[in-house]
Amino acid sequence: MTTDFQNGRDALGARLRELRVEAGLDGKALAERLGWQRSKVSRLQNGKRTPSVTDVEARAVAVGRPDTAAELKGRLSGLESRYRSWRRQLAAGHRARQEQGVAETAATTVTRAVEAVRIPGLLQTPEYARHTLATAAEFRRVEHDVDDAVRARVRRQEALYDPDKTFRFLIWEPALHARTVPPGVHAAQLDRLMGVIGLDTVDLGVVPLGAELRRAPSHGFWIYDRRLVVVGTIGTEMWLTDGDSLTTYERAWDWLAEAAVHGERARRLIGRVRASLGAV
């Protein structure tokens, strides 16, 4: 499946190729001017490799169009803003990313979130967040600033009580069962979920394992109003703002929402999972 990042890289490559052709140069001649391997010229033009800022500046000069450097750097910046390596984002720890979450939530009126394998950060207890963030830091081998990150995540949750905001969560039932934290922490987290049901700013839907789905949730994502979708994978996080992506993820939201249970039915489902943990 082609990603928005790859589509953007392909478009940048096509623009680089266009400028080379307009200059009357073939790939070999351009490579000689730049002192590059010809394969590098080819891979950049075919969207197989992401150029650096220095690369696009050098190419603009080499094809006699230094005036296009700003345009090319703008296209490159757009790519980097949509496709963010977790390792790069978290190089200094998790706190900065959590602060971004605080800012985005503050700027948003309607937040919609889908989580398939974990509890949404906005609904996590401090101890559940602590274990989750500590594990993430260990897995990604980044700085361990968990205490600061937890404080930021908990501060973000203050928005749940803002009467001018609306939060709509969809949680696939497997996320309730995933035992990624100690039993006592897990139980307290499920209690927390049951507690937010009925909060007038929060609509919590749970999609049962046995529900008939038009499309299974393949990963979690967050929609901030109709201006931003944030999608996380193991290695990267995508921030998508184009209309096509917003429409696609809204459709994914709507299809999953069809199968969700709410209110007392959701509370009973969570309660059954809680009971399966026994006395903890």
Image (tube, helix red, strand yellow):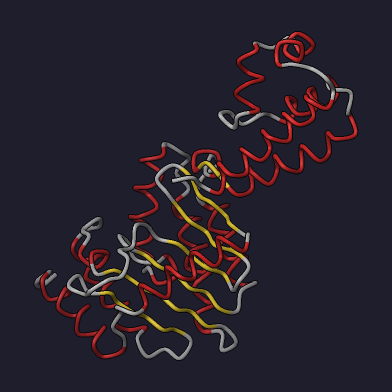
Residue at 60% across, 15% down? 39
Residue 38 picture location, percent across and down: 65, 12
- 58 or 14, which is in the foreground? 14
Report the front residue among 83 and 66.
Answer: 66
Drawn side of residue 115 relative to residue 245, left or right = left
The quadrant in which the C terminus is found is bottom left
Task: Please tell me whether residue 40 is drawn above or below residue 161 in the rendered image.
Answer: above
Residue 35 as seen in the image, left or right of residue 207: right
Q: Which residue is drawn at 57% across and 44% down?
A: 5
Number of dots carrying numbers? 0
Residue 209 position by quadrant = bottom left
Left or right: where 29 falls relative to 225: right
Image location (x, y in percent) of residue 254: 42, 75
Residue 65 at what x, y percent from top left? 88, 28
Q: Which residue is drawn at 58% across and 28% down?
A: 49
- Residue 60, by quadrant, is top right
Q: Is residue 33 above or below residue 12?
A: above
Provide residue 136's location: percent of width, then percent of height: 38, 47
Residue nearest the viewer, comparing 47 with 161: 47
Q: Does residue 85 lie above or below 169 as drawn?
A: above
Residue occupying image coordinates x 67% and y 33%: 13
Q: Is residue 236 above or below residue 185?
A: above
